[in-house]
Image (cartoon, helix red, strand yellow):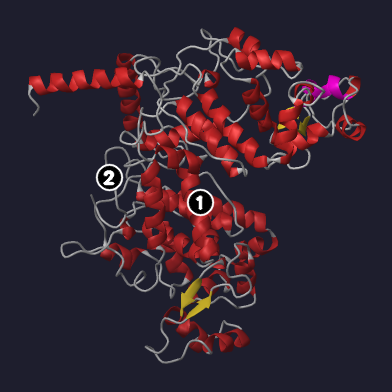
Amino acid sequence: MASPKSFACSVIALLFAAHLVSAQLSANFYDKSCPNALSTIRTAGCDGSVLLDDTPTFTGEKTAAPNNNSLRGFDVIDNIKAQVEGICPQVVSCADILAVAARDSVFALGGPTWVVQLGRRDSTTASLDTANNDIPAPTLDLGDLTKSFSNKGLSATDMIALSGAHTIGQARCVNFRNRIYSETNIDTSLATSLKSNCPNTTGDNNISPLDASTPYTFDNFYYKNLLNKKGVLHSDQQLFNGGSADSQTTTYSSNMATFFTDFSAAIVKMGNIDPLTGSSGQIRKNCRKPTSSARCSLVVMVVVVLAVAGGSSAQLSPSFYSYSCPGVFDAVKCGMQSAIANEKRIGASIVRLFFHDCFVQGCDASLLLDDTASFTGEKMANPNNGSVRGFEVIDAIKSAVETICPGVVSCADILAIAARDSVAILGGPSWDVKVGRRDSRTASLSGANNNIPPPTSGLANLTSLFAAQGLSQKDMVALSGSHTIGQARCTNFRAHIYNETNIDSGFAMSRQSGCPRSSGSGDNNLAPLDLQTPTVFENNYYKNLVVKKGLLHSDQELFNGGATDALVQSYISSQSTFFADFVTGMIKMGDITPLTGSNGEIRKNCRRIN
């Protein structure tokens, strides 16, 4: 433990450092405190006062005339902030996130990049009056534009360069109506074109691109447009209207490199306008509202944690990670999109992992645990050995989620979300996945051997095994429809294609060509469970059953003169009915005895307990 003296020295050093950073911003500000901040902002997505929402006791800047119904993208900043908070809680300001995101937006759309100076802190106040008075209006003439920028320490050169940001984006009709109907220094064809979307008396919020040539590319077409009287806003065309800005506008129209250089220099200057640093302001937890005092925050946090801990053991919820890891669903979806783009079959493999996990001890990720010298998992059970796959996909997604929200999201929840996304990506239905599961610290080899329905099961055994998990016969028939994607091993359908009579003879012969009769020969050869569309999630699986083309014995049992024939027929005639029942079945299966509250753990690595 540190001595009182060394602790005091640390405090003094900290105060000294705080004093130093108040003097200037630095590109290296987060190198030690949050080294992944910039990469997180880039992949997700000057005091942050514009981000603050109005409240009954606080009036922000969002409803100021230049901002109301004009500014957008607050949800993007919210998402980036949530991801940054996941890796560095209360370290990076909303103001800095906005500065970095602006740079990355320009670069992503083809423009220049620059070193962003960091170390800003967030305002605890906002000013509606200042927003109304200081932000240049689209009706300003060149003299007023120059003055507005000069008031912020920016030169006429800076103003003309920064106006080039209008090479991307759109404007509302209300902001250019007067120009297109009343002014003469505008190309007639542009005016006519804009009038079609901006009536003289209505359509205030209709939008048109500020640069009709390349509205989503950051280039110098904005200036080329001005030379041809094609500036959309009055304030735009003022930059080329026989005044002092004409020469610089002409330079930028012919030399994009000069524009990029001047734009970068000006936006760095703009980012240095009166930043809050050192002990001024705060680091907001939520960009939309000021952070309350530390003591009050701590009390609220304790109450919330206790409430969540008390309630989470009772039920799962789609909103479980809304505050602790709002980016988890996007992260899992991105991982599955990448995996399926690389190999279509993997989607079915992930769905199978989820089935086989939930049928043993509930949906607790016990199937993901590797065997060790002192631990026997479920991977070597008969239904799993040589059959289940996709563990590396879950590993990769877990790693991505840990990057944004370390120690928050369970492997069990990742698997549940990944199964849903697999179905949806391959053309099937989607649904709200309930989350809040925790990971098991145990596994059951015997449970895997006894609980997972084997492919040799008859209808009665299938019904019984599903009933043991709280699933009805209807759930069983609907969930079996997941065999519309994926493949099966020869060893699991050999007896059906060689020994049984309720199979189409042509289909049997085609399967026999890839699956020799003798056990031990070609056991692991694969065949699609749905020959027609093996990587598309639809109702062809059921259509195959009525013509005796079910690959597994257990598949054909669903249409074999028994109690489930009618349900199979209904899924053939109505894919939407199948999808609806499948979703219901998946949600019910996801509810099988989950670990919640303080039970289990949140694994750091899905393959082993912590």
Q: Left or right of 543: which side holds 601?
A: left
**Rendered image: mark on residue 601:** 2
Residue 460 drawn above or below residue 274 = below
- Cα–Cα span, label 2 and label 1: 25 Å
Q: Few, some or many C-alpha atoms within 10 Å of disc 1 (few <14, some 14-19, many ≥20)?
A: some
Q: Which mark is residue 198?
A: none
Looking at the image, residue 416 lies above or below residue 17 = below
Q: Would you say residue 586 is visible in this rendering?
A: no
Which residue was labeled with disc 1?
A: 334
**Magenta span: helix, strand or loop, mainly?**
helix
* Residue 31 on image: x %, y %: 34, 36
Residue 155 seen from this side: yes
Q: Amino acid at mark 2?
A: Glu
Please report the bounds of the magenta region as a residue range: 172-180
Q: Name the residue located 67 percent from the left edge and 41 percent from the top edge.
A: 256
426 in relation to 111, above or below: below
- Which quarter of the figure has residue 599? top left
Q: Quadrant of residue 86?
A: top left
Residue 286 % position (x, y): 45, 25
Q: Position of residue 47 (x, y in %)?
A: 48, 20
Of label 2 and label 1, which has the lower sequence position? 1
